[in-house]
Image (spheres, coloured by chain):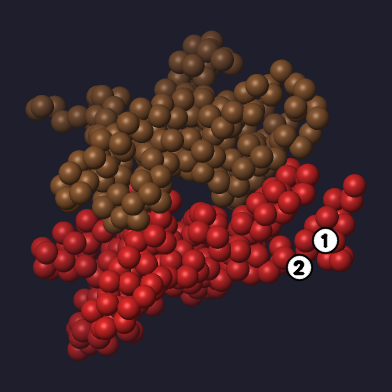
Chain colours: A red, B brown
Amino acid sequence: MPTYLTLVGFGPTGWGWQLLLASWMTLSVSAAAFAIGLVCGVVGAWAKLSRSPAARRAGDAYTTVLRGIPDLLVVYLFYFGGSEVLTSGAKLFGQSGFFGFNSFMAGALAIGIVSGAYQTEAIRGAYHAIPRGEIEAARAVGMSGLLMLRRIIAPRVLRFALPAMGNVWQSALKDSALISVTGLAEILREIHIGAGSTSRPFDFYITGFILYLVLTTVSGAAFRATESWTLRSERRP
Amino acid sequence: MNELSFLGDTMRQLLSGVPLTVELTIISVSVGGALAIVLSVLRASFAPFASFVRFYVFALRGTPLLLQMFLIYYGLGQFDTVQHSVLWPFLRQPYWCAILALSLNTAAYGSEIIRGGLQSVPPGSIESARACGMSGLLLYRRVILPLALRQALPAYGSEVIAMVKSTSLASIVTLMEISGIAYAIISETYRALEVFLCAGLIYLVINFVLTRAIASLEVWLNPHLRSATS
């Protein structure tokens, strides 16, 4: 019976390299999801803050629906439904045969769209936190539209939204475990395979537990460091 | 099969999973909620436990719930002592493992929410209760917990909604609640979009009803905030 350290170590019979690669996969799929979520979040916040009632209603529907149904269902939708849509879409362009998302794309899209619903709320909240006076001042010096967005609104929103975004990142990181149901070789999937092919399931799952804790702790610390860096110019109490 | 009858049939099958989803939610929210109160009181009042509770919260909030469920369901069986213990008849069933994982997980999030509530109890209320001679459990039962729980209720409502969504993970350890049935129908018919719409609708209705119920509970618990005219 191998010891725990040879089991998860980097030796010839160890699972170290697989687990390291799997951690990298978890990080990259979560980062892709977070980036997709950021795009959805910006569009969603713009819709919710817009003057058009139709856009506001669409934004509301997006956040209500995606925050009200389990993420697992969204993953199923993209993994199984994505191929349905792509195959019939390809038919329109005269391509026959089967087209599907690979599990990375389906997973990143699914978690990203869910994450976007939470990012919408974070960005919207941050926008409301901008003191009205700053926007008035920007208008008074003649800025308008895009210039004001670029120089005043976007930097302020980024700064105010950062703490909430940190939380959204953490949940995207944890939600990425759901992508394991599509067979993507991220941490939970590798751990599950390891647990199934040896007689040491607990050792593997506890290793996964530690890997996730390391990822969430390190990235949490990175977010906090960024947060205090952006606050360096704020007034201190 | 035409579209409408497929939707109707899917809906009927999915609705048969609602009782299990509701059951999992109610049991794990009650057990987890009770545990959350114990944890947050321990952390606030009994210094030796504080670092244990902090570690518990850190570990369970920093890892995916699905992994916690797998750890309990597949992982614990590695040990002979667990396999020969009195708990084994429970721990080998996916139902109890799912409930255990869900309860432990929500207890970690819940204890943080209640901790916020405990911190918001005005010191004056505690002082006046002490001045009346209350202490220990009586003080907690009569003054601190009612005030803290009332304060924590809105945030706890979101946690309950999150739990409804989390019960879907029980389908991965083979429980046939709404998501489990949805997965079975999708892999049988490959009509992911229709099944997703039906299942999503059911979850939205459950969460809508819950949101309303929690909002009215909030109004009921805060008579001093109601407007005088109503």
On screen, residue B35 versus residue A123, left or right, reads: right
Give the letter of the chain under mark 1: A
Classify 10 Å Cα crowding around label 2: few (below 14), some (14-19), many (20 and above). some
Spot occupied by residue A105 in the image (x, y as percentages of width and height): 45, 70
On screen, residue B14 versus residue B170, left or right, reads: left
Answer with the quarter of the image where residue A17 lies.
Answer: bottom right
Residue at 34% x, 61% y is A81
Residue at 40% x, 55% y is A76
Residue type marked 1: Gly
Q: Compared with residue A150, is residue A50 higher up or lower down, i.e. above or below? A: above
Judging from the image, what secondary structure is the residue with disc 2 in?
helix
For the residue pair A63 and A228, the one nearer the viewer reads as: A63
Q: Which residue is mark 1?
A: A14
Give the letter of the chain under mark 2: A
Classify 10 Å Cα crowding around label 1: few (below 14), some (14-19), many (20 and above). some
Residue type marked 2: Trp
